[in-house]
Amino acid sequence: MTVSLSEYGRFVVVGAVVGLLAIALRELIAVTLPADTPTYYSISVIAVYVFGIVVSYVLQHRITFRVSLGESNWRVLISFVGVALIGALATWLLALLLRYGLAFDRIFGRLSGSLAFAVAAVSASTVTYALNALFVFRRP
């Protein structure tokens, strides 16, 4: 696989924008939850990932890999969703580990949920870029 630094740069910028939107949305969802427990925290992370997958698909298609949406097909969409689900699972597990396993709550207080999610999402992006570049957006 040939990695393009400019392509990876675009991937990171798009991911950062979607990530910031996701963090803001997770905060809004958190305010509406009845309690701050691992279950409700997980619900907020999963809900945000649904939003993030849709926005990321559109932006990565156009900006990072420069493929128009008209050129998309079911294989690309299904592959993208598969990679996004791998990223979501990795982010969810890592966020739970950081927040509850490494006691982010005690260290960072009220910011622990967002910080754990942000660190986990950035970490998972290294894997999802490689998978997207290798399997999703490469033309035959």
Image (cartoon, rainbow, N blue to C red):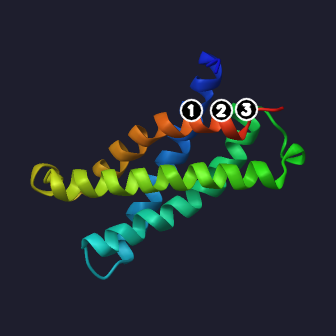
- Residue 7's x, y, as percent? 65, 24
- Number of numbered tags placed on the structure image: 3
Q: Is residue 94 left or right of residue 9?
A: left
Q: Which amino acid is tagged 1?
A: Ala
| Secondary structure of the residue carrying numbered label 3 | loop
Mark positioned earlier in the residue sequence (2 or 3) = 3
Residue 114 seen anywhere in this rendered image of the structure? no
**Residue 64 in sight here:** yes
Amino acid type shown at disc 3: Phe
Which label number is shown at residue 65?
A: 3
Determine whether label 1 and label 3 are within 8 Å by CB.
no
> In this view of the protein, which residue sits in the foreground, 132 or 30?
132
Q: Which amino acid does label 2 sit on?
A: Leu
- Secondary structure, mark 1, is helix
- Image spot of residue 61 (x, y percent): 74, 41
Q: Does residue 56 appear to the left or right of 124 in the view shown? A: right
The N terminus, quarter of image: top right
- Disc 2 designates what residue? 134
Residue at 56% x, 63% y is 50
Of discs 2 and 3, which sits in the foreground? 2
Residue at the outermost left position:
106
Residue for badge 1: 130
